[in-house]
Amino acid sequence: MNDAELIIRIRERDEAVLSELEAKYGRRLGRVARNILKNEEDAAECLNDVYLKAWNSIPTAAPENLEAYLATLTRNTALNRVRDGNAQKRIPQELILPLDDAAYENRSEDRDDTAAIAESHSEEERIKAVINAFSERLTEKDQKVFVARYYYDASVNKIARCLGMPGGTVKSTLHRLRTELARRLREEGIEV
């Protein structure tokens, strides 16, 4: 079944399409999740979240490339899990406040924290937009190298083998792309 048919079935809310997505893309998406999360159970939970996100988002926004869309959802979901897991581990126990109303009376820092969180989310969205625009302007070969390395977390040797390129060419391409992306981010006023 092709991607257009899968998208139509998702829009029609045919639940059987989820097992077809799993059969068609589960192995590749699972590899992306495992490479980031380094845990089989976390990767399986991540994929369940990805299928749910796709189920909820596709009726309003049909992606042109379903595999790339699912891979991006998987990557972002896995990275969010890593970030959230690490954030919980970094909070010292003595800084965790009780959840009663008295602990939060007249705390101006809460308003500052909310503004800082909102600002960091908008900055994150800005960075994503710059990176997406950057990758869309790349040649097909450069885009494959970029996506394989930074979305699928593939090794240089694996990229070279899959794309039939020498390892040194992959390394120099990645170096050039990182340099160009860093320059582009600086032009947009984003700290690198």
Image (tube, rainbow, N blue to C red):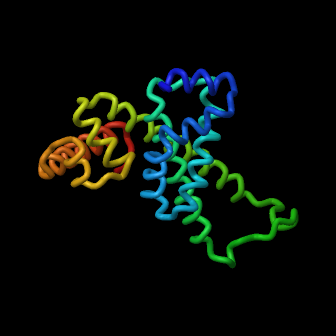
Task: Give the x, y percent position of residue 140.
Answer: 25, 30
Tell me if I can see residue 125 in this picture: no
Q: Residue furthest right?
A: 101
Please determine whether, in this image, residue 5 is positioned above or below residue 77: above
Task: Give the x, y percent position of residue 173.
Answer: 18, 44
Which residue is at 18% across, 51% downward? 171
Figure disc tally: 0
Please determine whether, in this image, residue 20 is positioned above or below residue 6: below
- Name the residue nearer the viewer: 82 or 21: 21
In which quadrant of the rendered view does residue 119 lie?
top right
Which residue is at 57% across, 71% downward? 90
Q: Residue furthest bottom?
A: 94
Tell me if I can see residue 98 in this picture: yes
Task: Give the x, y percent position of residue 60.
Answer: 63, 23
Which residue is at 58% across, 64% downward? 85
**Position of residue 190 in the picture relative to residue 24 (left or right):** left
Task: Give the x, y percent position of residue 134.
Answer: 33, 34
**Position of residue 111 in the picture relative to residue 17 (left or right):** right
- Name the residue nearer the viewer: 183 or 132: 132
- Name the residue nearer the viewer: 11 or 1: 1
Which residue is at 56% across, 45% downward? 121
